[in-house]
Amino acid sequence: MSATPETGPDPLDIESPNHLLRWLEEQELAAPGEKIETSVLAGGVSNRTVRVQIGGRDLIVKQALARLRVEDEWFSPTDRILTEFAALGVYGSFLPGQVPEPVRQDRERNIIAMAAVPEPHANWKTRLLQGFVDPGSWQEFGRMLAHIHDKARPQVDRLPARLQSKMHFHSLRLDPYYLVSGLRVPQAADFMQDLVNAATNSRNTLVHGDYSPKNVLLQDRRLWLLDFEVSHVGTPWFDVGFALTHALAKALWSPLWRRQFLQGAESFWGGYRQRSGPAVAQDGGEAAGCRHTAGCLLARAVGRSRLEYLNDAQLDRQCALALRLMANPPSTIPDLIREVTGQLGET
C-alpha cells in the first residue's frame, strides 16, 4: 500500500502507513512526501513489524508492544527493542551475511529499523510445518549457535551494556515460561525455580533467548538469524534447550514426520557438539541442557506462550513428557533424545 503524510497522534503506530511515513521522515529515512510501499509482517506476538520499500531500499521497521498478542495478560517494557538494536551489531560481527544490518533506533518511541533480508527467502518454521525437514539445516542451526556462544564467551564483559541486563529475559522468558509453568503445575515448581536461579546467576556467554526456527530465514543454504530482544549474558543451555524443544515438540505433533524431526534434534546437537568442543562441559554441561529442555517443553505446553500448532491432547502429552524428564533427568543430550524417542513410540 502507498502512504501519504499525515499528522497523527502519539502513540505512533507503525502499522498505519501514514504514521510510519511520518516516522521515516523524522528519522531522515524518507524525503518529505516520498512514496513508500509497506506490508505488515504477521506472526510475531511481541512487536509490530513492517517491511518498507523506499527509494530502492528495503527496510524492516519494528516497534515493541507493551502488551503481547497472546491470550494471557502479558506485559513487557518496550525498551527491549533497543536491546535488539544493540544485539544486531554484535551478532552481525559473529555471523557476517547472516544477520540484518542495523539502520536506525528511536530511543523515545522504542522503534528500530534494519535492512531487510534479501529475497528470495522462506521462514524456516513455515517450511518445517509443511514437512520440509532437512537434517542439514538442523545441523547448521546447531553449529551456528555454538559459534555464537564460542565467539562471545571471551568477551562477555565487553559486550554492550544492554546485553548485560537480564531484565527482558525475565519478563519475556523466565517469568512467563518457567515461573508461570511452576505455578500451573505445582509438582514442577521447585524444578522450574532451580532453572530460574541457575539462568539468573550465569554469565557464561551471549544467549539469544529465542533461538527458534520461527526466527530463521532460509536463503538457499544460508540461515539468517532474527529477533534479538531477549539477548543477554547468561547460560548457553537455555538456548540449547529452547531450540531442542522445537524439534521435539514437532516430533510429538506429527506422526507422519516424527522420525525426521527426531533426526533433526540429533543433527542439531551433533552440529552444536562438533563446533563447541571442550566448552560443552561448562556451566553445568549437558545435564543442564537436559534440564532446560525439560523446562522449555513444559513451558511451551502450559506457560503463557503455548505452541499454537499443538492441540489440547498434544499439549497434555507434552506436559506429561516434560514431567517424566524432570522426575529422572537424563545426563546427556543423546540420552534425552533417546528417552523422548521411546516415549513417542519410535525406536
Image (cartoon, rainbow, N blue to C red):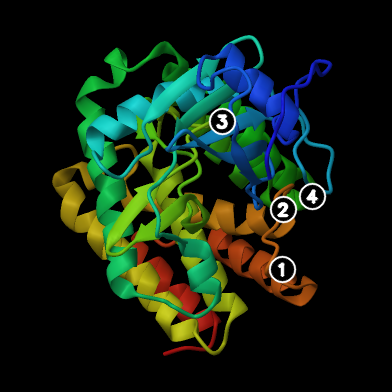
- The answer to whether the residue labelled 1 contacts the one labelled 3, judged by CB atoms less than 8 Å apart, is no
Local crowd at mark 1 within 10 Å, few (<14), some, or many (≥20)? Answer: many
Q: Label 1 vs label 3: CA separation?
A: 24 Å
Q: Label 2 vs label 1: CA separation?
A: 17 Å
Q: Tell me what residue is drawn at x 74 percent, y 42 percent.
A: 180
Q: Badge 1 is on which residue?
A: 315
Q: Is residue 183 in sight in this rendering? A: yes
Q: Is residue 79 in sight in this rendering? A: no
Q: Label 4 vs label 3: CA separation?
A: 20 Å
Q: Badge 3 is on which residue?
A: 169
Q: Earlier in the sequence, mark 1 or mark 3?
A: 3
Position in image of residue 316 (x %, y %): 74, 70
Above or below residue 118? Residue 135 is below
Q: The residue under label 2 is which amino acid type?
A: Gln
Local crowd at mark 3 within 10 Å, few (<14), some, or many (≥20)? Answer: many
Which mark identifies residue 184? 4
Question: Looking at the image, which is closer to me, 317 or 123?
Answer: 123
Q: Badge 2 is on which residue?
A: 187
User: Based on the displayed image, in which of its 4 quarters is residue 279 positioned?
Assistant: top left
